[in-house]
Amino acid sequence: MKKDIHPEYHEINVVMTDGTSFKTRSTYGSAGDTLRLDIDPKTHPAWTGEHRLIDSGGQVAKFKKRFQGIGLKS
């Protein structure tokens, strides 16, 4: 392997959305840094099976208004 081309691999702290944390090795930041997750397997719908509808910019309201007479239940 070539010397001095690989990033430093060190131990960091990872904090999940519920506040639990664990240590892992990564190239993120520097030794001892903390990585705080916004989405993790405990909260993401892909892993939990929960489906949450997030209305960004009123898109859901626009859809319901446009198709209110078709017989969709709200």
Image (cartoon, grey):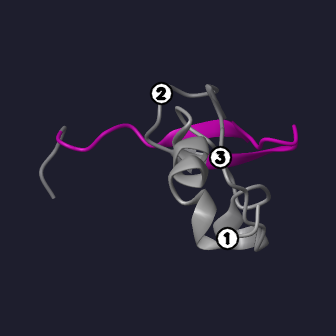
Q: Name the residue type under label 1.
A: Leu
Q: Is residue 1 above or below residue 56?
A: below
Residue 74 lies in what quarter of the image?
bottom right
Quarter of the N terminus within the rendering: bottom left
Q: What residue does disc 2 label? A: 29
Instruction: Tell me whether circle 3 and circle 2 mark residues in contact (CB < 8 Å).
Output: no
Q: Position of residue 67 (x, y in %)?
A: 54, 60
State how far apart marks 2 and 1 are (Cα): 49 Å
Give the mark nearest the N terminus, 2 or 1: 2
Residue 22 among those drawn in magenta: yes
**Mark in the foreground, 2 or 1:** 1
The residue tagged 3 is: 54
Q: Amino acid at mark 3?
A: Ile
Q: Which element is circle 1 on? A: loop
Q: Quadrant of residue 32?
A: top right
* Mark closest to the chain's N terminus, 3 or 2: 2
Numbered disc in front, either 3 or 1: 1
Look at 50% across and 52% down and name the residue there: 66
Q: Amino acid at mark 2?
A: Gly
Secondary structure at badge 3 equals loop
Say whether marks 2 and 1 touch (CB < 8 Å): no
**In the image, is residue 1 above or below residue 7?**
below
Separation of marks 3 and 1 at Cα, in angstroms: 18 Å
Residue 18 place in picture, x, y as percent: 87, 42
- Magenta segment: 5-24
Q: Which residue is mark 1?
A: 72
